Amino acid sequence: MAKVEIYTQFFCPFCTRAVKLLRDKGVSFTEIDAPHGSAARREATARSGGGTTMPQIFIDNVAIGGCTELLALDRAGKLDPLLVTSG
């Protein structure tokens, strides 16, 4: 499986939805608490190239965006291939 990291914040419906999708797919992931003003939030913004919305999701260290992008990848059938590591 690919390395999946998701930066989230408390009481964020988009974060909850993204986490639910990953859990429903049986994906192992690291959830990083990134409240506004935190070092983790600054790290997520830097890693994503300036993305400031929550969640910020990374698959094998590649920023894929947030919940909307995650759901779009899934609907297009492109998420599952990203979650499988070759080799």
Image (cartoon, grey):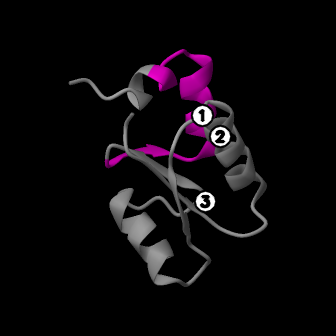
The three-letter code of the residue at mark 3 reads: Met
Q: Which residue is mark 2?
A: 23
Q: Tag on residue 84? A: none
The image shows residue 47 at horizontal and vertical percentages of 34, 61
Quarter assignment of residue 24: top right
Q: How far, Cα to Cα, is label 3 from label 2?
A: 18 Å
Q: How far, Cα to Cα, is label 2 from label 1?
A: 5 Å
- Tag count: 3
Quarter assignment of residue 62: top left
Q: How far, Cα to Cα, is label 3 from label 1?
A: 21 Å
Q: Secondary structure at mark 2?
A: helix
Task: Give the mark toward the camera: 3 or 2.
Answer: 2
The three-letter code of the residue at mark 2 reads: Arg
Residue 75 relative to residue 51: left or right: right
Q: Which residue is mark 1?
A: 26
Asked whether 36 or 81 is in front, the reply is 81
The image shows residue 1 at horizontal and vertical percentages of 39, 33
Q: Tag on residue 54? A: 3
> Magenta span covers which residues?
61-80
Q: Is residue 65 magenta?
A: yes
Badge 3 density bin: few <14, some 14–19, many ≥20, Cα 10 Å: many
Residue 12 relative to residue 22: left or right: right
Task: Kindly check if marks 2 and 1 are in contact, taking CB atoms under 8 A apart as contact.
Answer: yes
Q: Quadrant of the C terminus?
A: top left
